[in-house]
Image: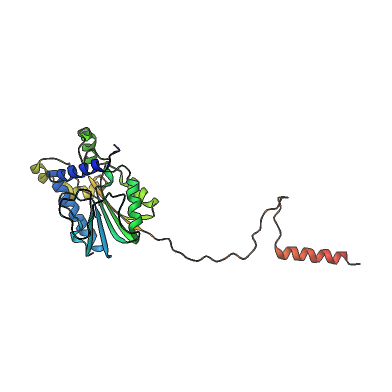
Amino acid sequence: MVLNNPVASIRTIRFRLREWFKGVAGRSLLGIEKSVLDEELPDLFGYHVLQIGALEDGSFLGSSRISHRVLCDLTPQKPLIHDDLICHSSHLPIDANSIDVVLLPHVLEFEDDPHDILREIERILIGEGYLLILGFNPFSLWGLWHILLAWRDTPPWKGHFYRSTRIRDWMRLLGLEVIKTRHLFFRPPTRSNWLMKRLSFLEKLGNYLWPWFGGVYLIIGKKRLIPLTPTKTEWRIRRRLITSGMTEPTTRARQIFERGNKMTRKP
């Protein structure tokens, strides 16, 4: 389902999504996502890291070694800290080629045009900068819930669950090289806290037996620069076809031919 919502409606969706993350399934998913990001973020260095879109309790950037952390959201839960922004994710008031790491947690599923957001992120990323995307996997138990509960018109089930392969294709078109894809959370999004705990064994089991069917994927991409390497100039005359269909002779062949003609013309 593709959403056609103005900014006010997107604010409402983001607010409802944060409320959902306060429930049993949402809290369990947040715990897994934070643990995975705690493994990945410390290895990404730079001067500026940006998270677009807050979830239940704000920032995911606590484990990052980058000191300057910025949170961009349409509906901030807490008072703005330092350089935090209130803006739409497709119109970021940030200079081009200035951000080292961008984190995008469950944003593309609830936007009219995810391509615009990815293009804007590519614009602000420095060369060799990183993009991390968290998204819901349609080929999972969460995808099944999405099909069954889409009629409720409430997040997260009203969003568009994109395939990870599709997101990777969009990234490659923008010059973002996909360097890692991880799948996580193999339990169903049940509301029962007791059942959620009883099914915790599925996390290790699913990661080994059916890793592509995790409820959520994490895609990490890197903005590649096109090297400006000089190319050698081709000084030789290229041989080409003339109207007769024969190949044009080389310079040396023409000289020999002309010298032969002069010799035959002498008395």
Residue placed most toward the observer, 212 or 208:
212
Q: Is residue 190 above or below residue 60?
A: above
Rendering coords of residue 238 (x, y %): 64, 60
Relative depth, front residue between 129 and 142: 129
Residue at far right of view: 267
* Figure colour scheme: rainbow
Image location of residue 228, percent across then percent down = 46, 64
Q: Count the numbered circles shown.
A: 0
Vertical placement of residue 234 versus 123, above or below: below
Task: Describe residue 264's horizontal placement relative to residue 100 as left or right.
Answer: right
Q: Residue at x 32, y 54 (%)?
A: 121
Q: Is residue 139 above or below residue 227?
A: above
Q: Is residue 129 left or right of residue 259?
A: left
Quadrant containing the C terminus is: bottom right
Residue 44 in sight: no
Q: Quadrant of residue 81?
A: bottom left
Residue at (10% x, 42% y) in the render = 195
Residue most toward the top? 151
- Whether residue 217 appears in this view of the structure is yes
Residue 244 image position (x, y, % from top left): 73, 50
Looking at the picture, how far across and down is residue 3, in whole percent? 28, 38
The N terminus lies in quadrant: top left
Residue occupying the point 33% across, 44% down: 113
Query: Which quadrant of the structure image shows residue 222?
Result: bottom left
Residue 162 drawn above or below residue 31: above
